[in-house]
């Protein structure tokens, strides 16, 4: 088992360099890539710690979407069902399950469906032609191996996007590693996500880049404190991820002079980070709060932010069931609600037998 782990570790060192080369040729921020839904948090925990986490070692099988190396023994036999309601009619449903194999490592299975709702269809003359739907599907298969304090993992993903019967397909790979301190409640994670190829673009369109993301993060619970802190750095393959709309310049004086927005080094750095905290009120209850600076800067209005970038939530465990909820603020007009239900189904079926 050690030899495959070494090979995967070498791949982790090579992929970021290769990914960085791809980024030079194709910008991957601000909706300039296909399958941007892959960057959305599919479950309540990920949404509650800033929208991403490569180091949050929990019992939630949905963490295979954060970092495949986060698969652990606490997830074995557990099934997680998640629902995310965004603005308008945009809705996401996700299922994740983890099972351990003594010889082949720990496996994770994920299926996510995102619906953008129904839209009115018209012909070139403006005559109504009914409605059409827009949706995305993501099918994931993960595997992880643990050697000492290190876990290495990979996720193979197949993604399909559909617009009015026109489909695009892509194959992607996530690779990650996690270090867990043998004594302290401290983990460090690294993941290279969404490395892949658009196998089939939409009819009449060219192939587009995929939402590549190199993430590094850590989670730590100080001793004798009922708090866990998580910080994640994202899009490390590209330093400048700031988008400025130069058309939205402000008039500063009566003579009509304007001030064009400029990028600052501090803002460039801050947009790479999300921070989150969990108040642990026992094994069966906690409260979470997080802040995503890039989301706040990109989705705020000129005169107000409406809480954009903030997220609040919690977890409640009742018997064998675990409930999680997160309210993530995206815009002054509203936010997204995430609900996750987790249960050990292997244990449930074994009791019946």
Image (cartoon, rainbow, N blue to C red):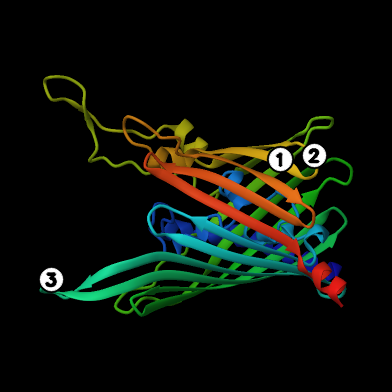
Number of other residues with Cα within 10 Å of mark 3, as a class: few under 14, some 14 to 19, many 20 or more: few
N-terminal of the pair, mark 3 or mark 2, is 3
Mark 3: secondary structure: loop
**Quarter the C terminus occupies:** bottom right
Mark 1: secondary structure: strand
Return the x and y of residue 349 as percentages of the image width and height: 81, 73
Q: Mark 2 points at which residue?
A: 282
Give the spatial CA distance, label 2 vs label 1: 7 Å
Q: In this view, does 105 lie to the left or right of 123?
A: right
**Front-most of 348 and 103?**
348
Return the x and y of residue 125 as percentages of the image width and height: 10, 74
In the image as oriented, which residue stretches furthest toward the top? Answer: 254
Can residue 9 be seen here? no
Q: Which of marks 3 and 2 is in front?
A: 2
Mark 2 touches mark 1? (CB < 8 Å): yes
Return the x and y of residue 70 as percentages of the image width and height: 73, 57
N-terminal of the pair, mark 1 or mark 3, is 3
Give the spatial CA distance, label 1 vs label 3: 53 Å
Return the x and y of residue 95 as percentages of the image width and height: 62, 67
Q: Is residue 132 left or right of residue 247?
A: right
Q: In this view, does 325 lie to the left or right of 310?
A: right
Give the spatial CA distance, label 3 vs label 2: 60 Å
**Front-most of 36 and 76?**
76
The label shown at residue 126 is: 3
Mark 3 touches mark 2? (CB < 8 Å): no
**Quarter the N terminus occupies:** bottom right
- Number of marks present in the image shown: 3
Q: In this view, does 54 lie above or below 61?
A: above
Mark 2: secondary structure: loop
Q: Name the residue under label 1.
A: 286
Going 38% across and 65% down the picture, which residue do you hit? 117
């Amino acid at each position: 088992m050690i030899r495959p782990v070494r090979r995967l570790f070498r791949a982790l060192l090579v992929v970021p360099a290769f990914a960085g080369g791809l980024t030079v040729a194709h910008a991957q921020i601000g909706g300039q890539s296909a399958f941007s839904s892959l960057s959305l948090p599919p479950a309540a925990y990920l949404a509650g710690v800033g929208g991403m986490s490569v180091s949050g070692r929990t019992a939630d099988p949905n963490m295979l979407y954060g970092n495949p190396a986060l698969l652990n023994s606490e997830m074995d036999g557990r099934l997680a069902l998640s629902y995310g309601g965004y603005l308008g009619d945009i809705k996401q449903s996700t299922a994740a399950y983890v099972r351990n194999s003594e010889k082949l490592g720990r496996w994770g299975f994920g299926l996510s469906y995102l619906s953008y709702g129904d839209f009115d269809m018209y012909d070139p003359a403006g005559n109504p032609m009914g409605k059409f739907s827009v949706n995305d599907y993501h099918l994931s298969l993960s595997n992880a191996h643990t050697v000492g304090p290190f876990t290495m993992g990979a996720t193979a993903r197949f993604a399909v996007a559909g617009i009015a019967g026109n489909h695009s397909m892509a194959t992607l790979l996530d690779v990650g590693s996690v270090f867990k301190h043998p004594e302290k409640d401290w983990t460090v994670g690294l993941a290279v996500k969404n490395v892949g190829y658009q196998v089939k673009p939409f009819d009449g369109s060219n192939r587009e880049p995929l939402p590549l993301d190199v993430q590094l993060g850590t989670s730590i619970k100080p001793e004798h404190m009922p708090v866990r802190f998580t910080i994640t750095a994202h899009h490390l393959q590209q330093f400048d991820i700031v988008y400025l709309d130069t058309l939205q310049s402000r008039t500063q004086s009566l003579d009509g002079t304007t001030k064009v927005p400029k990028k600052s080094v501090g803002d460039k750095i801050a947009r790479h980070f999300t921070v989150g905290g969990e108040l642990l009120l026992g094994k069966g209850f906690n409260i979470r709060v997080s802040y995503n600076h890039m989301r706040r800067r990109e989705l705020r209005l000129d005169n107000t932010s409406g809480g954009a970038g903030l997220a609040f939530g919690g977890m409640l465990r009742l018997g064998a069931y675990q409930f999680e909820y997160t309210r993530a603020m995206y815009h002054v007009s509203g936010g997204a609600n995430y609900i996750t239900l987790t249960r050990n189904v292997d244990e449930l079926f074994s009791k019946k037998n």
